[in-house]
Amino acid sequence: MQSDLTHPENETLCQRLARSISGERHGLMGIAIIIVMLYHWGTLGSCSLLVRLYGYFAVELFLFLSGFGIYYSLAKTSDTRQYYLRRFWRIIPTCIVSGIIFVWVHHEALPKLYSFSSVYPWLAFLGLDVWYIRTIVIYYLIAPLIYRLMQRLHYPLLGITLYSAIGYLLLSFVSMEQYHPDFLVKTTVFWSIKRFPAFLAGMYIAHKAGNGGNLVALGIMAIIGVVVHAGLTYGVLFQGLSFQVRSDMEILLFPCWGFILWGMACCLRHVGGWIKAGVEWLGKYSLEIFLAHSAIFALLPRAWWLFPLACAISLAAAVLVNRLAKRVCACFGK
């Protein structure tokens, strides 16, 4: 039986974490999309190194929140068909509208639309050329299977299965990167493997909270991951270690995302006024902003002083995409 996150009496530490994240979900997504835009802009003066080292973690935060939310969505209904339909109408119309609006950014690919020589221009036209969208669609497709597996396995077997799967993914990723680097870079496999632990961790923590579990094992794994990653970061900054090596090992941080988001949620809860309202507004449009900002950023020179303008245009474009997508859905009675 799903635990009610709205009643804090006698709750476990895991339930408290889940309740905090659930209550500030839009705000956390808003913070994550700000970090994504900072990372993709890149040129930010003295802040560039900090953004380069940690900016890409924002995508892991998104994926954790997606897995976390998907678990509760699946817990509310046993109708898998309705689950898939909700995901379809939330993602696909937005992607198609975005693709139609921003396809002119890929104007060099437009002639190929008529020659059928490559699938990529059609993906761009449909707004599906963004790796994140293709990856999250894969995760959403397999999420019901993961949910059912979590319901059937009991502790500690579930934890052992989770950590074994993460270990297998890590070994698979490293092996394929060594022997098939071109294949990884050119396909969604690269991102699907590398980012899946964050999505899985979101579902796992939601499951543990719903069943009164504890965070001991996850906490130990998080400490180990932080220590290893801190050592790799030191190597990048002071020992000449390849940045790619550190980036590859970010998979070790999957146990940390719940604790990081918990801390961010606690901070958000104590921030009021227009700041909190602003990040929550950004969170509600996070998908549209993710799709819009890449096209807008591609048109502007990467000077730090143009970043606010690029963000403002991206936000306006995101609102436009959102409203047009809602009209498309309304035409189909959704």
Image: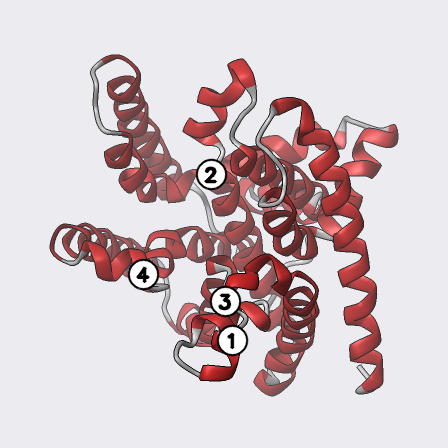
Q: Where's the C terminus, which quadrant?
A: bottom right
Q: Write down the quadrant of residue 246 in the picture.
A: top left
Nearer to us in this view, 316 or 206? 316
Residue 277 percent location from the top left of the image: 83, 38
Residue 61 appears in the picture as rendered: yes
Residue of label 1: 122
Q: Which residue is mark 4?
A: 186
Separation of residues labelled 2 and 4 (CA atoms): 21 Å
Q: Which amino acid, by three-letter code, is at mark 1?
A: Trp
From the viewer's perspective, tell me whether residue 128 is left or right of residue 312: left
Q: Residues within 10 Å of mark 1 (few under 14, many from 20)?
A: some
Q: Residue at left 32%, top 37%?
A: 247
Report the disc number at residue 109. Answer: 3
Other residues around mark 4 within 10 Å, as few (<14) / some (14–19) / many (≥20): few
Amino acid type assigned to the residue bearing label 3 in the image: Ala
Residue occupying image coordinates x 43% and y 50%: 198
Report whether residue 10 is seen: no
Q: Are marks 2 and 4 in contact (CB under 8 Å)?
A: no
